[in-house]
Amino acid sequence: MEPDRQKFLAYLAGQGLKSTRQRDIIFDAFRSDGSHVSTEDLYLKIRRDHPGIGYATVHRTLKLFTECGLAEERHFGDGQVRYEWVAGKEHHDHLVCVRCGAVSEFEDEDIEALQQRIARRYGFTMTSHRHELYGVCSSCGGED
């Protein structure tokens, strides 16, 4: 059994919750999605093959993934909470298109180093950060 699933099952057991087939289906669908998904997006994807899984079950399960550290909530300014699978992924930042809502991930060592220098300059110990750039993607007419 892969470590992410073991971590989730251990978290459920520690919370006195059961492992269910529905949670397994949601786990697999969310982890394989690879995007920044809302509860509704994931629910609609799952509902096609598993109409017995309700919206509330998907939402509660996404919250469980977040609580146990497998996922993080993302707020990209559109009023919708999105979830991102973060287990096993390297740190990255986001480019968010304000027209179409597309979210792209990027990594930049220079930005990471600059953030560390700024934190040290102010005597600040950085434990985490989120970096999101908002603008217009090339598909919507942004600069190339």
Image (cartoon, grey):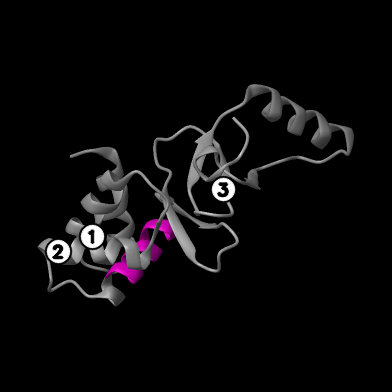
Extreme-front residue of the structure: 141
Q: Using the image, tell me which numbered label, if any, was put on residue 93.
A: none
Residue 97, image x and y in percent?
A: 56, 49
- Mark 1 — residue? 45
Residue 76, image x and y in percent?
A: 57, 57
- Mark 2 — residue? 48
Q: Using the image, tell me which numbered label, if any, was put on residue 96.
A: 3
Residue 29, image x and y in percent?
A: 23, 52
Q: CA distance from mark 3 to mark 1?
A: 22 Å
Is 18 inside the magenta-drawn segment?
no
Q: Residue 1, relative to residue 28: is it above or below?
A: above
Q: 60 left or right of 79?
A: left
Q: Residue 6, relative to residue 55: is it above or below?
A: above
Q: Residue 92, relative to residue 82: is it above or below?
A: above
**Rendered image quadrant of residue 23:** bottom left
**Residue type for callout 1:** Lys
- By secondary structure, the bulk of the magenta-drawn segment is best described as helix
**Residue type for callout 2:** Arg
Point out the stretch of residues depicted in magenta: 58-67
Q: 129 left or right of 114?
A: left
Q: CA distance from mark 3 to mark 2?
A: 28 Å
Going 76% across and 40% down the picture, which residue do you hit? Answer: 125
Going 50% across and 37% down the picture, which residue do you hit? Answer: 105
Q: CA distance from mark 2 to mark 1?
A: 6 Å
**Residue type for callout 3:** Val
In the image, 132 versus 88, the foreground residue is 132
Which element carries disc 1, helix, strand or loop?
A: helix
